[in-house]
Image (cartoon, coloured by chain):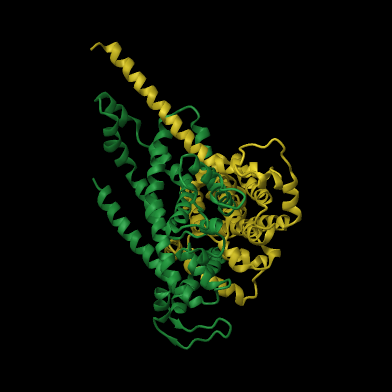
Chain colours: A yellow, B green
Amino acid sequence: MDYEKESLRAKRRGRVRRVITYVLLSIWALIVLFPFYWMLLTSVKSYSAYNAEYIPSFFTLSPTLQNYVDAFTTVNLARYFANTVIFALATTAIMMVVIIFAAYAFARLDFPGRDLVFGLFLSLMMIPAELVVITNFVTITNWGMRNTFWGLILPSVTSVFYIYLLKENFEQIPEELYKAAKVDGTSDLKYLFKVMLPISQPTVVTIVILKVIECWNSYVWPRLITDDEAYFLVSNGIQEIRENGFGRENIPAMMAAVVVISVPLIVLFLIFRKKIMAGVSRGGTKG
Amino acid sequence: MQKKNWKAWLYLLPAIAFLGVFMVYPLIDVFVYSFEEGYNSASQTFWGTGLYNYSYVLHDPYFLQAVKNTFILVIITVPVSTGLALLISLGLNSIRRLRDFFQTVFFLPYVTNTLAVGMVFMILFKKTPYSDGLINLLIQFFGGRPVDFIDGPYWAKILVMCIYTVWVVMPFKILILTSALASVPQDYYNAARVDGTPPLRIFTRITLPMIAPMVFYLVITGFIGAFKAYSDEVAIFGTNLNAAGMNTIVGYVYDMLYGDSGGYPSYASAAALILFAIVLTITVINLMISCKSTQF
């Protein structure tokens, strides 16, 4: 057995293994991408063409944008869309204010009972949303906030996890900087906004993106709290469209709506890919 | 000094207020609700306290169906998705070219609206008068008989539900496992290679023990997530899950609260607490097993 032969065989074995790896990964990529392709494809097929295909074709020679026109004219897709944008931006903005102040207090200020309060905060992370949603539903109903933006927004403007994440980040900023600022006579608030936030910008951006994604996809709470179509978000809108929108048969128009709903998040993801993936691996819990 | 204390509490005030109203108070309240018998949400009265709500829920056929569906979903999807994610991550870790591309593609389902994409799965699996649907045509192509996966037999509906759930949870698992695999020190592999260790042995003796904590983390969060399944089912079978026989425990809670079958916060609370007890028990068991087997 000479050395040359042996190393050649090892090389070949390695190449075979690599080919198999690429094939398997490509199969999974196909499984992931296929639904996206299918919705895009179906959304540009005309209604009559779609229904005439007993065997659905994998491409279309006469794409049409009529379904997109239908999606925006026959149902209130634009309204759902605008509601979701308002909801996502308002919730995220209010939450950022709440958590920035809380994280600042925990990270930079010394006060009696701080560690105890922080411990209590952390223990709240274990509470599943399903337990508290029942009372929240009753609370919001009693406050007369059903079918309002406040009712949608208020229960989700705090997140213990994000407070924790931001606090960790704030704590990494050296103490000396704070002392120097104090000597210069900078106020606490000014220090927070002029020094701490700019330094922690990557974490802040990550939190904002993750929260926007969460808002965009939220379904359960909006469904409980809104039954007036004027306040539907996209998730509820799509269910509404499915059950009483175009009629069950107009699947191309439905798929056009699905594309419109999916595109903003996919674009956001492609722009902030690295940040989103790093953020999720630090603290995502979906799955 | 005194002034500073006062300021700190002021900074914390919004967070404490929101958490108090929407987290702590509801947590106490849900127990109260669950013991109030015959609670009427219109007049806010009840006629007694006791365990009746629990007994009602536990004898409700819809709840038992929901428990069955949820357990099947958990038992199938958690091992399948974790195993598959491990396989894919190992593959990802062994390649260099196109790795970024694959990672991006594999993460896509995480950032999509699951309600919207569920609709695509529905039309792929659905059998309509116009067409058998793509999946059924594939089945026929390979010589099988077409099945209506959305309104058909129970096993077919369970199958679609599991497939879609796996599709949805994979991105998170792949992401966590690839970063766990990447953090195994390269020296260990080099040492093993010098010793001529076969690949399978490298995997069981080096890779697996090194990433075991992350695998357990995924199993635990996977169990918790699967027990809370709800919106993926709505996406495929529509909002009336009881009629489809595909409700989950969380779905049962929400149906008790709202909609045509709603208005019973007491039953909803009892069901939610039963779910919480199940999840807590299984998480503790998981933690005990993982503590025992990651000590070496």
Residue B166 image offset from top left, x and y in percent: 45, 49
Q: Which of B39 and B11 is in front in this view?
A: B39
The residue sitting at 41% across, 47% down in the picture is B81
Residue A182 visible: no
Q: Nearer the viewer, residue B135 or A176?
A: B135
Residue A286 image offset from top left, x and y in percent: 48, 52
Q: In this view, does B45 lie to the left or right of B130?
A: left
Question: As drawn, which residue projects farthest toward the bottom?
Answer: B47
Residue B196 image offset from top left, x and y in percent: 25, 25
Residue A161 visible: yes
Residue A85 image offset from top left, x and y in percent: 67, 55
Q: In this view, does A87 lie above or below B104?
A: below
Q: Is residue A193 left or right of residue B227?
A: right
The residue sitting at 48% across, 60% down in the picture is A110
Q: Is residue A41 left or right of residue B18?
A: right
Quarter of the image that includes the C terminus of chain B = top left
